[in-house]
Amino acid sequence: MLFDSHSHVDAPEFDVDRDSVLARAHAAGVTRQIVPAVSAAAWPKLRDICAADAGLYAAYGLHPMYLAEHRPEHLIALREWIGRERPVAVGECGLDFFVEGLDAERQSMYFDGQLRIARDFDLPLIVHARRAVDQVMAAVRRFGPLRGVVHSFSGSADQAKRLYDLGFLIGLGGPVTYARANRLRTLAAQLPIDHLLLETDAPDQPDSNHRGQRNEPARLTTVCDTIAALRGVEPEVVAKATSANAERLFGLMR
């Protein structure tokens, strides 16, 4: 049984065939998914989609790439929404210093606000950190102790170690399946398995077999198989360990 720790099945790309996408995921053994929000406007739809499927778990947050949609009052609304809806995590939140035009100061304001909320509600964080891993760690240290996952990790082995020393797991998905992703594949082979989560980031970041196509949660099997091959173990070993990690982080122990 596989656990997709980061899937946007609430995205508009799935509006025409969401039920089929979820059925394919279940058929592939992907029985549980964390579905993080990206903006305040998306929260009600995400809540309703997760309520209709026992294998979907909602997280609510304000994604840095959607900065133009955020307003300071959304942080107040997020605190109220989390207090009422009781999600499994705060997110997707974080920092993105790769996309041009995203104001760093405003990003930090929203990220800091969500770190406070996670601390106050004792919830894990789902963090986006693109060209911003060191800055994310600095912010976490200011508000800690905190826990969570840095999803779609693309940093160094040293940064990964510092993150799990802070209580954060490392999320790996489609990019690890590309043969040229040497640093990422080395990390996947050597990272202590109790600090690893699997993800698809569907509909984004497809694996190398589906380059340029819409990604979907069923393809988590390819991520698992790739990481297992890199580590020299059977896929079942990776599936069992990473599912247990997700259960522990998100408080879903069976």
Image: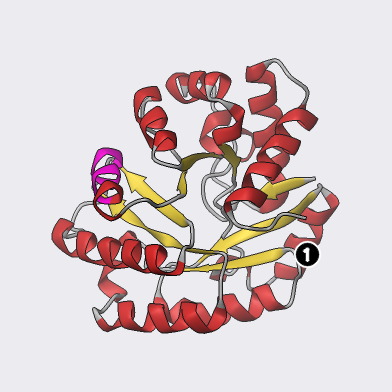
Toward the right, the furthest residue is 27
Residue 136 appearing in the image:
yes
Coordinates of residue 146 in the picture (x, y in percent): 40, 52
Q: Quadrant of residue 172?
A: top right
Coordinates of residue 127 in the picture (x, y in percent): 41, 52
Query: Is residue 22 shown left or right of residue 76?
Result: right
* Disc 1 residue type (three-letter): Ser
Query: Closest to the observer: 240 or 64?
Result: 240
Query: Is residue 254 shown left or right of residue 153?
Result: right
Q: Is residue 230 above or below residue 110?
A: above
Point 74% across, 45% down: residue = 2
- Residue 154 on the magenta segment: no
Q: Is residue 186 above or below residue 58?
A: above
Coordinates of residue 47 in the picture (x, y in percent): 59, 78
Coordinates of residue 80 in the picture (x, y in percent): 42, 84
Q: Main secondary structure of the magenta part?
A: helix
Magenta span covers which residues? 133-139
Query: Closest to the observer: 165 or 202?
Result: 165
Point 69% across, 78% down: residue = 51
Point 71% across, 31% down: residue = 238
Residue 98 appearing in the image:
no
**Is disc 1 placed on a helix, strand or loop?**
helix
Q: Which quadrant: the C terminus? A: bottom right
Residue that badge 1 annotates? 20
Point 72% across, 54% down: residue = 253
